[in-house]
Amino acid sequence: MTTTTETTSVSTAVDVNAPIERAFQVFTVEIGTWWDDDKHILDVPLAEMVFEPHVGGNIIDRGTDGSECRWARVLAYDPPRRVCFSWDINTQWEIETDPAKSSEIEITFTQMTPGRTHVVLTHRHLDRHGDGWQRMREAVSSGWSLTRFADIAEQTHSNRHVLGQTMPTVSDETRRARLAASFSRSSAVGIHGGSCTRSLVT
């Protein structure tokens, strides 16, 4: 994996031993299988992540207490070659409600061979965050790692093809079970785009 830093952007790339369709699927709708559990701005542990696969959708973090955080908007969705979403988090690591002050993450997928894909992630327009944006660049330059993503994409692709038979894809059921259990004594508050909210526990 390689990482480069430009003045107002950060880019990292990795080659994945999986077909382009599989790499795209894992990065997007299966984001919860590879995203680090500690990389979120909820006040409680992360239970699951949801990627809404369409322009105008959100990336949503759900906490173990039922709280939700919609920290990104899907700006482009072109499977299996390109996806782009906003980074609606400010330099104080809180939700940014002004789209003009949000940066963008673009991921491109290029087929090298039928079973190998080149993936490039670029986090750009970091200067839109205003004062202190350089600190944001420093944080994301070390935070964006595609190693685990590549490992999961390669692992699940391999697991689905055993002795010539297609096996079920590894799911995120463990996270979903944790979330379901947390609702035994709680009810979630409604979510309205670009926000983090907590549940009410009785």
Image: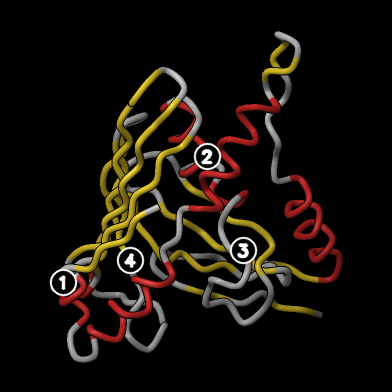
Nearer to us: label 4 or label 3: 4
Which residue is depicted at the point 31% across and 54% down?
A: 85
Give the residue number, with chain letter if any, for mark 2.
Answer: 26
Q: Which mark is residue 87?
A: 4
Of the two numbered discs 2 and 3 in the rendering, the one whose residue sits closer to the viewer: 2
Amino acid type indicated by mark 3: Arg
The amino acid pointed to by label 4 is Trp
Q: Nearer the viewer, mark 1 or mark 4?
A: 1
Foreground: disc 2 or disc 4: 2
Residue displayed at 56% across by 43% down: 30
**Residue ID at (52%, 77%):** 41
Q: Nearer the viewer, mark 1 or mark 3?
A: 1
Q: Is residue 174 left or right of residue 26?
A: right
The Cα–Cα distance between marks 2 and 1, rounded to whole angstroms, is 27 Å
For the residue marked with disc 1, what is the amino acid? Answer: Thr
Rendered image: mark on residue 8: 1
**Which corner quadrant of the image does residue 10 belong to?**
bottom left
* CB contact under 8 Å: marks 1 and 3: no
Q: Is residue 8 left or right of residue 175?
A: left
Q: Residue at x 64, y 36 (%)?
A: 155
In space, the residues marked 1 and 4 are separated at their CA atoms by: 14 Å
Residue 199 coordinates in the image, percent (x, y): 67, 74
Task: Choose the circle earlier in sequence order: 4 or 3.
Answer: 3
Q: Mark 1 or mark 2, which is nearer the start of the sequence?
A: 1
Element carrying mark 4? strand
Quarter occupied by the C terminus: bottom right
Question: 53 or 159: which is nearer to us?
Answer: 159
Q: Residues within 10 Å of mark 1 (few under 14, many from 20)?
A: some
Left or right, 199 with reference to 178: left
What label does residue 62 carry, if any? 3
